[in-house]
């Protein structure tokens, strides 16, 4: 028995990314602020990494975890934003089949890796404040190395099926993605096949990974707050809050942008489709740009390290 007529066309070998399908004239205006944010994100994270690498006083587990976060931010930016800018500047909308699913894998895995890194950093702050005498024996370089392996392995393995499932679908004719980025749902809905399991796996995996991290972060800060409220000395309270203040601000940036993105996607029928597309781009730019700045401004050791680095140049 022959295949249905809509399956007889040649398979798709590349996709076309159509940014802001209703407002394509926005692209040239948006390219300047997005370029500045991209350069800020890359420059700030590179500066932070070099500072931590060169400054001996920053060779501590807390700063190694911050280095891991900066590396994740830079890879996310480099995977997504250059392609977006190429579309804006040169109208380079085509992306290869394999390139699209590689971008999808990096976005899904590194997003959850960032969330997991925040969870490990929250545990680091919990031990530092709730068990300060045991901190040097618990939070060691070996702990950071094992934590980094866990962050990469857990999230890489559990998110890998998302692009694999999507790439195994049949794309028979339509190859226009109404997005600047190869998100799973934007791509898979072009398929001729049933994508129910694909969507279900992404939903379950995403919320299991992000949800478990969020619960552990909340628990860590609940214990921290409980200990801080017991401290009567004002200086000790201020010091305890300052040690986790920067980390809490980073989590707030990450969670807020992600929450807004989720809400706008759920309310897609009530808002212009271009809004979630823009928020998706900003989610790959704003946290990476702000994370190193927050730590650089609020952490005296990093600020002094950056000043030393600038004097060497």
Image (cartoon, helix red, strand yellow):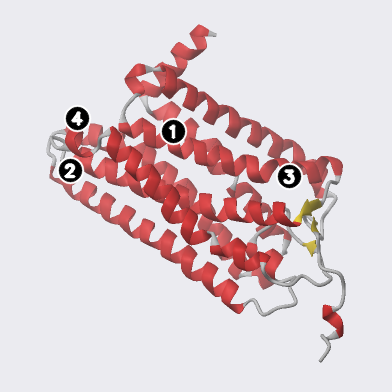
Circle 3 residue = 83
Q: As drawn, which residue projects farthest toward the front? A: 1
- The circle drawn on residue 67 is 1
For mark 1, does the 10 Å Cα neighbourhood hold few (<14), some (14 to 19), or many (20 or more) residues?
many
How far apart marks 2 and 1 lie (CA) works out to 24 Å
Q: Residues within 10 Å of mark 2 (few under 14, many from 20)?
A: some
Residue that mark 4 sits on:
235
**Res 187 → quadrant:** bottom right
Closest to the observer, 173 or 274: 173
Left or right of residue 128, residue 273 in this image: right
The residue that disc 2 covers is 130
Image vertical order of residue 124 relative to residue 11, above or below: above
Cβ atoms under marks 2 and 1 closer than 8 Å: no
Label 4 element class:
helix
Instruction: Please report the residue visible at 47 percent of the width from the left and 57 percent of the height from the top.
Output: 157
**Label 2 vs label 4, nearer the camera:** 2
Give the residue displayed 50% in from the left and 36% down from the top: 71
Q: Could you tell me how far apart the alpha carbons at marks 2 and 4 are, in whole angstroms? A: 16 Å
Measuring from the top left, give residue 185's x and y in whole percent.
65, 67
């Amino acid at each position: 028995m022959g295949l249905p007529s809509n399956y007889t066309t040649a398979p798709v070998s590349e996709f076309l990314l159509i940014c802001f399908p209703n407002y394509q004239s926005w692209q040239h205006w948006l390219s300047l602020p997005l370029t500045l944010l991209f350069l800020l994100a890359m420059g700030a994270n590179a500066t932070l990494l070099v500072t931590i690498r060169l400054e001996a006083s920053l060779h501590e587990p807390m700063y190694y975890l911050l280095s891991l976060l900066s590396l994740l931010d830079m890879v996310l930016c480099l995977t997504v934003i250059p392609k977006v800018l190429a579309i804006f500047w040169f109208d380079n909308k085509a992306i290869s089949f394999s390139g699209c699913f590689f971008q999808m894998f990096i976005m899904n895995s590194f997003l959850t890796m960032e969330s997991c890194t925040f969870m490990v950093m929250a545990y680091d702050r919990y031990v530092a404040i709730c068990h300060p005498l045991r901190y040097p024996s618990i939070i060691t370089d070996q702990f950071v190395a094992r934590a980094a392996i866990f962050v990469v392995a857990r999230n890489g393995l559990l998110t890998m099926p998302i692009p694999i499932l999507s790439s195994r679908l049949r794309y028979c004719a339509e190859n226009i993605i109404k997005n600047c980025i190869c998100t799973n749902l934007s791509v898979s809905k072009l398929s001729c096949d049933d994508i129910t399991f694909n969507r279900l796996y992404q939903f379950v995996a995403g919320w299991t990974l992000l949800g478990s991290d969020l619960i552990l972060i909340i628990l860590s800060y609940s214990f921290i707050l409980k200990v801080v409220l017991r401290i009567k000395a004002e200086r000790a309270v201020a010091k305890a809050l300052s040690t986790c203040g920067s980390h809490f601000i980073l989590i707030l940036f990450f969670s807020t942008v992600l929450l807004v993105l989720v809400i706008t996607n759920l309310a897609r029928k009530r808002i212009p489709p271009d809004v979630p597309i823009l928020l998706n781009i900003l989610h790959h730019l704003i946290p990476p740009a702000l994370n190193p700045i927050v730590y650089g401004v609020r952490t005296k050791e990093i600020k002094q390290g950056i000043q030393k680095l600038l004097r060497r140049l």
